[in-house]
Image (spheres, grey):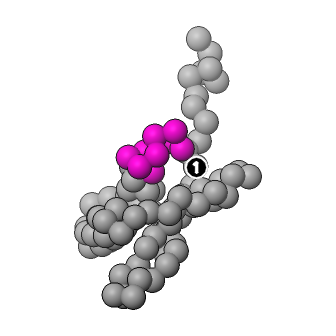
Amino acid sequence: MTESSNTHPPEPTLEWFTHDILPNGRQIYAIRNLTGLDATSIVLDESTTQLMHALLGELAMNNAIPFGQAKQAVLRAVLRAISPRQT
């Protein structure tokens, strides 16, 4: 096997953004693939948004892992959990 046959395509770069703000003030997030031509957004439900918000908040306070790497890992995990065919 050559070295090039062992390589995997790069993971997409993901970003989250506020999709909506509910009457109670809570936000609904969406995740978007920033890599390539597929800029499709996946809108999260309220409970998944709250979980992702809590995870990212905890990771932002922990310097053991660079936040950018941790954020990408959380976003990929959330996408895989809610839509296994998307990643």
Label total for image = 1
Image location (x, y in percent) of residue 52: 34, 64
Secondary structure mainly formed by the magenta segment: helix
- Residue 18 within the segment the image draws in magenta: no
Write the residue at 56% across / 22% down.
6
Query: The residue tagged with tag 1: helix, strand or loop?
Result: loop
Residue 56: percent from left, percent from top: 33, 67
Can residue 81 be seen here?
A: yes
Q: Residue furthest right?
A: 37
**Nearer to me, 28 or 23:** 23
Residue 61 occupies quadrant: bottom left
Q: Residue furthest front?
A: 23
**Of residues 45 and 62, which is closer to you in this image?**
45
41 to the left or right of 67: right
Residue 64 drawn at (x, y percent): 27, 60
Question: Which range is magenta?
Answer: 79-87
Mark 1 burial class by Cα count in 10 Å: few <14, some 14-19, many 20+: some
Which of these two is toward me, 20 or 32?
A: 20
Image quarter hosting the N terminus: top right
Residue that lies at the very extreme toward the top in this rendered image: 1
Horizontal side of 51 relative to 45 (left or right) equals left
Residue annotated with mark 1: 12
Q: Residue at x 44, y 63 (%)?
A: 44
Task: Decide: is 21 above or below 5.
Answer: below
Depth check, front residue: 66 or 47: 47
Give amino acid for label 1: Pro
